[in-house]
Amino acid sequence: MTEDFSRAVAVVRSVRLQPDRDGPPKGGHYILGRLIVCVAVAAVAMTGAALGGHQAQTAAPRKQVLAWADVRNGYQHDSISHAVATIERLGRESGAYDTFIRTDSQLITKHPITFPAGTGIAAGEQFNVRNLNDFDAIFFFGVREIDLSPEQRADLLSFVKDDGKGFVAAHSAATAFFSWPEFGEMLGGRFDEHPWGITDGTVVVDDPTFPAMRHLPRTKVFHDELYQIKEFSREKIRVLAHLDASRLDLTRPLVHRTDGDFPAAWAKTYGRGRVFYSILGHGADDWDNPALQQMYLQAIRWALRLVDGDATPHAR
């Protein structure tokens, strides 16, 4: 834009307003000439700004997020379809990312995905297929034991740990891959029942400066299926929010924790990558809650490195 404006100014300086044949410039003629020149300058400057804006938009493509919701071997929450649709909408509306939704695990690989010749839509056409190398983060809403080959498992861990990509997980994600210790290490914790079922739970924000927490008040009540988490350590994760244990019935048979520490959301690093998890999001209507939407949107933006936030572990 600066260069275009400079050229426009040069044009103005080169203009010579000619006097009337009968004498010096008349006021009306002179003002009209100056007005025409000013309009020309404005037009050139606006055109340059428009072109510059277009160039800026095309220079930075959106991030790519894989919404992965493989539930073939476990309980499919009714919310999953609406959840991944909401994640897709939030990305487009915010301009932060584009989402590819998959309910299988074919793309969980860094290796080429090939098909037999002649299986495209039209003769000679090849499949438009992606793999983990095409994505910047994963939004995971899977459940239980998902069929992944040893190679796929290694590629998933490497996607986060070595490539520095993001992994944002919701609710039942903590029930996935109990047979795979490395996944639990990457995620930061495991599902350990939901002793209180679906009820009102008071969420207390531990870190109001973290992007996914900034919009929340110090305490907020969520009506959700409240998970109890095991195999986590505050020395390895940064708990961003927790359930207020004073408002929970700790005499329920499935309550296993004796320290009253019930994380509701956390962030951590795994190698070079960023990981976020929250217990919230059981019901489809939960994903219409602006507070929950904003939490996951900002978590994805953090995982994509579009915004910074401290994931350093801290004591209770």
Image (tube, rainbow, N blue to C red):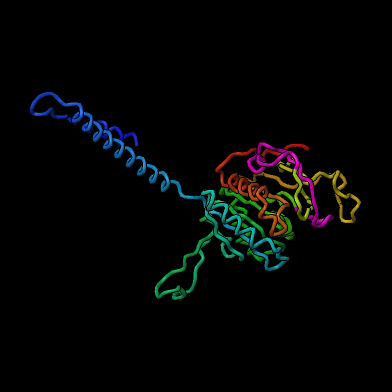
The image shows residue 112 at horizontal and vertical percentages of 50, 63
- Is residue 195 on the magenta stretch? yes
Viewer-proximal residue, 235 or 123?
A: 123
**Quarter of the figure with the N terminus:** top left
The image shows residue 217 at horizontal and vertical percentages of 71, 40
**Quarter of the figure with the C terminus:** top right
- Is residue 135 on the magenta stretch? no
Q: Residue at x 34, y 34 (%)?
A: 2
User: Relative to residue 301, is residue 180 drawn left or right?
Assistant: right
User: Relative to residue 205, is residue 50 drawn left or right?
Assistant: left
Magenta stretch, overall SS: loop
* Span of residues in magenta: 190-219
Residue 63 visible to the viewer = yes
Q: Is residue 146 above or below residue 263?
A: below
The quarter holding residue 37 reads top left
The image shows residue 267 at horizontal and vertical percentages of 68, 44
Q: Which residue appears farthest toward the left when viewing the image?
A: 21
Q: Residue at x 69, y 59 (%)?
A: 284
Task: Please tell me how many numbered marks the rendered image carries.
Answer: 0
The quarter holding residue 143 reads bottom right
Residue 14 visible to the viewer = no
